[in-house]
Amino acid sequence: MPETSDQREQRLEKLTALRAAGVEPYPARFSCTHSVAQALHVFTSSEGSAESPVVRTAGRIMSIRVMGKASFAHIMDGSGRIQIYLRQDEVGEQAYEFFLKMFDLGDFIGVEGPLFRTRTGEITIRVQSFQMLAKALRPLPEKWHGLTDVELRYRQRYLDLLANERVRRTFITRTRIVSAIRRFLDERGFLEVETPILQPIYGGAAARPFVTHHNALDCDFYLRISDELYLKRLIIGGLERVYEIGRDFRNEGISTKHNPEFTQIEVYQAYADYHEMMRLTEELWSTVAREVLGTTTITYQGHEINLTPPWRRWPMREAIQEATGIDIAVHTDLESLRRQIKERRLELDVKPTWGKQIEELFKEYVEPNLIQPTFILDYPLDISPLAKKKPDAPGLVERFEFFIGGLECGNAFSELNDPLEQRERFEMQWQQLQEGDAEAHPMDEDWIRAMEYGMPPTGGLGFGIDRMTMLFTDNPSIREVILFPALKPKSGE
């Protein structure tokens, strides 16, 4: 039933009564000897011994069942759920009446007593003493599992976590994924670093930035859209294997695949190319899956997906040709490409450059069908301003993106390390920016200056932690794997 103002008023009255009786409803501390999980474990480990273990634990009251002069309740902490049993003749008449009158669902309680197993087989704490730890002024929503208002779940994630075990498991899995990634890279000699989130020039990706203003310096800064150019400065500085896991920000639309604030990892390795990054990617993903999930086979939206290396390597040219019949190696200018699209009556948004039109063609007719892990290789140069040219393929670069479950999961390339060519690429991007392409890469003189000091051959990789978590937890929306996704504020909030 929905929360009413009467329910809150009743709880406020109890709060006043507690304080009038000299009871602090929000004490500063409670010393536990066991978590709920530890209490359950210690009982099963000692069951059959002469003495029952005594535990002191705490949690939120999730249910209360009054049976005259005895009551059962369930409490829950971060590790699990356990039943407690209060008898009037054990805790005393006054204390028992206090429990019945002052405690409500959602309140936090600390209890102490021996463990036993009820006739129905449930492990239970026989309460000898208890303490109010926090009075909840709003009742927990009843039948929370039946709510269909997805937006309410995201706005009140704390209630979603309380009531939905699957949601809790999702975010525990997410944390374990990040820990496993760190172990994988640390064991291979990579150094975790931190680079600026506030940047004077945004770069490293094709995206619109968020702009903010620094009052003391009286200048604009951008929230980073990528960590790339700062991490590559570290390669120039002699840190030959680096990575960063952090927040990036892109001022774009919100969808099941996009949130304006997201978590990304970027990895850079000197003396490597995009082939080495492919091997690193498939090894990392399969190792993390095995460590976190116990298997390299996952199920995502009804598809069984095998992450075991090696993954398929598929040139973009072949993928598009197979899906549409168009050979981008033959139709190497925008006009010719558009004629082919029109002749085949393909429904596509019109894009301003050859590379962007190819990208649109790929997204519409190839990407949704890439269910098993697949590396798509060799992208158009004009949408890859930071990647090294492919020697035997004019107009293409040594770049790949990888796809799993129909999702684009990451991006990598052999890094462009020629400063003169980088300047030419930036000038091309600057022209596109002037022509209205808000996602074109800006000119970055400091980055070119850094390159002029010499950058070794380098492979770079970036992928989203959010989409990885979506795949590992079988969630179709990015909002299900971000604790507090971006939402438009409600009026009055």
Image (cartoon, helix red, strand yellow):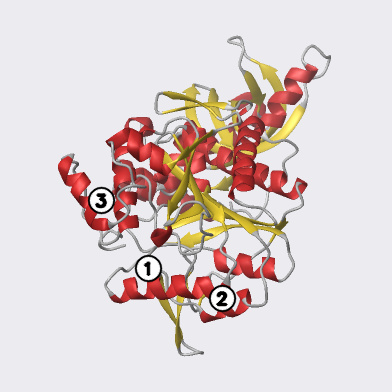
- Identify the image quadrant of the C terminus: bottom left
Residue 230 at x, y percent in the picture: 59, 69
Give the amino acid at mark 3: Leu
Describe residue 330's horizontal placement relative to residue 469 as left or right: left
Q: Amino acid at mark 2?
A: Trp
Sooner in the amino-acid sequence: mark 3 or mark 1: 3
Question: What residue is drawn where x is 51% and y is 41%?
Answer: 468
Q: Secondary structure at mark 1?
A: loop
Of the residues under marks 1 and 2, which one precedes in the sequence?
1
Q: Tell whether 317 sits left or right of 323.
A: right
- Residue 185: give x, y in percent of width and height: 70, 48
Query: In the image, is 388 to the left or to the right of 153?
Result: right
Residue under the image location 40 percent in, 38 percent down: 318
- Which numbered disc flags the more N-terminal residue, 2 or 3? 3
Q: Which mark is residue 404?
A: none
Q: Quadrant of the N terminus?
A: top left
Q: Which residue is mark 2?
A: 447
Residue of label 1: 440
> Does residue 30 sit above or below 144 in this rendering?
below
Crowding around mark 1 (Cα neighbors within 10 Å: few <14, some 14 to 19, many 20+) is many
Secondary structure of residue under mark 3 = helix
**Does residue 262 show up?**
yes
In percent of width and height, residue 350 lies at 21, 55
x and y percent of residue 207 in the render? 39, 63
Q: Nearer the viewer, residue 27 or 329?
A: 329
Place residue 122 in its image quadrant.
Answer: top right
Crowd rating for badge 3 (residues with CA inside 10 Å; few <14, some 14–19, many 20+): some
Question: Who is closer to the viewer here, 23 or 321?
Answer: 321
Residue beneath disc 3:
337
